[in-house]
Amino acid sequence: MTTEKTEQFTSKTVKLAQLAKAISHPARIEILQKIASHGTCICGEIVEHLPLAQATVSQHLKALKEAGLICGEIDGPRSCYCIDYTQLSELKDLLDGFFVGVETSRQKCNC
Amino acid sequence: MTTEKTEQFTSKTVKLAQLAKAISHPARIEILQKIASHGTCICGEIVEHLPLAQATVSQHLKALKEAGLICGEIDGPRSCYCIDYTQLSELKDLLDGFFVGVETSRQKCNC
DNA sequence: TTCCTTTATCGTAAAATTACGATGAATATT
DNA sequence: AATATTCATCGTAATTTTACGATAAAGGAA
């Protein structure tokens, strides 16, 4: 039994977990930073920038796309990616909510 | 070859990825929230609160401990967990840096 | 001392993740 | 038309993650 019981959690929690997972790999963080620094970015530029094979980078791009953090459109034989700032903002908001929730209830701890 | 090439990334990026991974599961988010709301929390209380077996919860607690986000001390036959707010702040700082970096370089996108 | 409670760890199984080379489809270039 | 470039996807392999039951260790209660 390896079924993830995500149904048992609030949708907010599940969404935060999904977005956190999207940025839980150094390559995917770098990809987001690279795209952001160009506004828009071709797959090839990202591949050049990373110590990973093209197939692997494409896989990471797919993960980011599925999480909604980037979107890509075909431009001739190339793929042009850009950040979805709406989703990124949602991640930011969910994280803010998380930190506020965790920190406001902060209490003494004997560690 | 499935060796993660984390050496190729900056330590900041790797650290952010590690901490993001720690909160990339709904159960682990809930655990942090639960502990925070009590200041300190016994393993059993967390198990009660989650739709997961005790062994699974212990596993998630271990992951959070290894990421440095919580610390636990033995209290009789129980295990008492609390949040490590220093690490949590580091996560917050790394995330802030990430969002600032990504958003300041924000440019037009045709999506 | 004997028994119960608590929880970490072991063993195991299924699925997901990470990585790569090879390939094919689409578009440019010659 | 023939060739080259770009990139998503397929196939595959190793590893990690997620989940659970069973068990053992440690401490408290009887």
Image (tube, coloured by chain):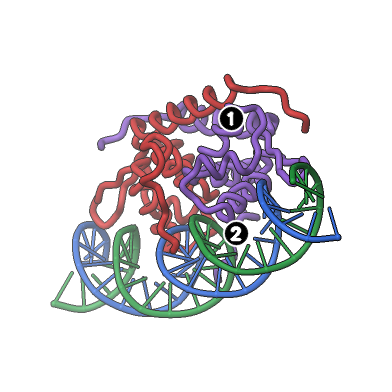
Chain colours: A red, B purple, C blue, D green
Q: In this view, does A72 lie to the left or right of B6?
A: left
Amino acid residing under circle 2:
Lys
Q: Say if labels 1 and 2 share a chain.
A: yes
Instruction: Provide the secondary structure element on which disc 1 rests.
Output: helix
Q: In this view, does B16 lie to the left or right of A72?
A: right
Does residue B72 appear in this view? Answer: yes
Q: Distance between the residues labelled 1 and 2?
A: 25 Å
Q: Quick check: B111 above or below A46?
A: above
The answer to which quarter of the image holds residue D25 is: bottom right
Quadrant of the frame with the C terminus of chain A: top right
Task: Tell me the residue at 64%/29% (across/down).
Answer: B89
The spot of residue A74 in percent (x, y) is 24, 51
The residue tagged 1 is B92
Q: Is residue D1 left or right of residue A102?
A: left
The spot of residue A96 in percent (x, y) is 49, 25
Q: Which of A49 and B14 is in front in this view?
A: B14
- Pointer 1 chain: B
The residue tagged 2 is B5
Q: Nearer the viewer, residue A94 or A64?
A: A94
* Mark 1, other Cα within 10 Å: few <14 / some 14–19 / many ≥20: some
Amino acid residing under circle 1:
Lys
